[in-house]
């Protein structure tokens, strides 16, 4: 598998480390747990999107763009990482964020501002209408915008996670470790699609379990297959993925996207207090809560090596300070 002919600007600190979590393993009682630290990709609090954005930026520059545009929820990690990548590359950035500006500028929104992005709020309007409008306005001002889809989840971005699994397989071979399962937060799908495409190429045969933070599994698996097939085609591979190739768990949606409940709070506290490891209320806290539940139910068990692929998101912790401290 040769990714070297695709336009890419190397920005992330790679490889991210794989860290043992002995105290967390003991605390939960079951498999040996490890973390792949993609919260440490090295740019503005890190996260999984930096791997995808390296490829988007490559394309944007090849097309002569001078401004990145993307969209997301108010506390979008993807938006913040896009703003950081734009700053790093000397480009401008416009972020179309859903809804109205919150009363308090905190978490990712604070960082978006510090990183110099222009924030546009959709109010009650559709994201795609506002994206079109912003792109038109930028062009009218003489700028050359490049649009990045929600979550960076297209074939261009998912390639970042095809490369990531190859990095992971190399690390596990060097350490003579065999992982039985990878568990992580899945949402717009590019991370999971890329991992599954890469795993087939790299012959990683362990399980790849996506803990959904916002979608029901059935329809989402079809979305994953579609991103995976586009990604495979981009890489000159056979586009032969279907919904059955994806393991998505939707039992952990709780009160819905970005609604922190007791399982997320417990996961945040256990990780912080047993390992000094921070996870967030929206994505990685929910994914870790799912992992803990799979251990408690005996699906992941003693004798196995389980990798928690930490995808970042920690700046959102600050936006949840009141709920987390019960003040
Ligand atoms: C911290 C974090 N983890 C996981 C994800 C999910 O990744 P994907 O959108 O590629 O499914 C996101 C997406 O926004 C995220 O911000």
Image: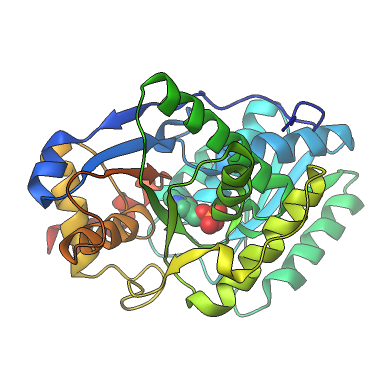
- Left or right: 322 in relation to 15: left
> Which one is nearer the viewer's eye here, 305 or 257?
305
The number of numbered badges drawn on the structure is 0
Q: Is residue 18 above or below residue 218?
A: above
Q: Residue at x 69, y 27 (%)?
A: 89
Residue 235's image quarter? top right
Q: Residue 259, can we see it?
A: yes
Q: Residue at x 47, y 40 (%)?
A: 47
Q: Residue at x 52, y 70 (%)?
A: 100
Q: Residue 116, can we see it?
A: no
Residue 211's image quarter? bottom left
Q: Residue furthest top?
A: 174
> Which one is nearer the viewer's eye here, 91 or 15?
15
> Which one is nearer the viewer's eye here, 55 or 146?
55
Q: Quadrant of the N terminus?
A: top right
Q: Position of residue 244 (x, y in %)?
A: 57, 69
């Amino acid at each position: 598998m040769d990714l070297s002919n695709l336009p890419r600007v190397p920005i992330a600190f790679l490889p991210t480390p794989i860290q043992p979590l002995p105290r967390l393993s003991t605390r939960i009682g079951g498999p040996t747990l490890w973390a792949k630290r993609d919260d440490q990709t090295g740019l503005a609090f890190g996260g999984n999107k930096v791997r995808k954005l390296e490829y988007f930026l490559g394309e944007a520059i090849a097309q002569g763009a001078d401004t990145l545009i993307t969209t997301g929820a108010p506390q979008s990690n993807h938006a913040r990482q896009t703003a950081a990548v734009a700053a790093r590359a000397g480009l401008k950035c416009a972020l179309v964020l859903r809804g109205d500006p919150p009363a308090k500028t905190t978490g990712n929104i604070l960082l978006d501002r510090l990183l110099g992005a222009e924030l546009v709020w959709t109010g009650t309007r559709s994201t795609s209408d506002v994206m079109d409008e912003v792109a038109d306005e930028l062009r009218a001002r003489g700028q050359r915008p490049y649009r990045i889809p929600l979550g960076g989840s297209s074939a261009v971005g998912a390639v970042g996670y095809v490369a990531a699994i190859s990095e992971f397989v190399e690390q596990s071979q060097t350490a003579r470790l065999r992982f039985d399962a990878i568990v992580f937060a899945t949402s717009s799908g590019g991370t999971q699609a890329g991992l599954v495409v890469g795993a087939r190429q790299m012959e990683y045969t362990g399980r790849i379990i996506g803990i959904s933070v916002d979608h029901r599994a059935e329809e989402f698996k079809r979305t994953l297959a579609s991103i995976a097939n586009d990604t495979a085609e981009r890489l000159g591979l056979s586009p032969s993925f279907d919904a059955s190739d994806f393991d998505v768990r939707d039992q952990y949606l709780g009160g819905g996207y970005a609604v922190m409940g007791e399982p997320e709070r417990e996961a945040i506290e256990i990780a912080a207090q047993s390992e000094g490891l921070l996870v967030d209320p929206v994505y990685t806290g929910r994914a870790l809560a799912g992992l803990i539940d799979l251990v408690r139910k005996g699906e992941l068990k003693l004798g196995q090596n389980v990798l928690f692929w930490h995808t970042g998101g920690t700046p959102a912790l600050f936006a949840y300070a009141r709920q987390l401290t019960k003040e």
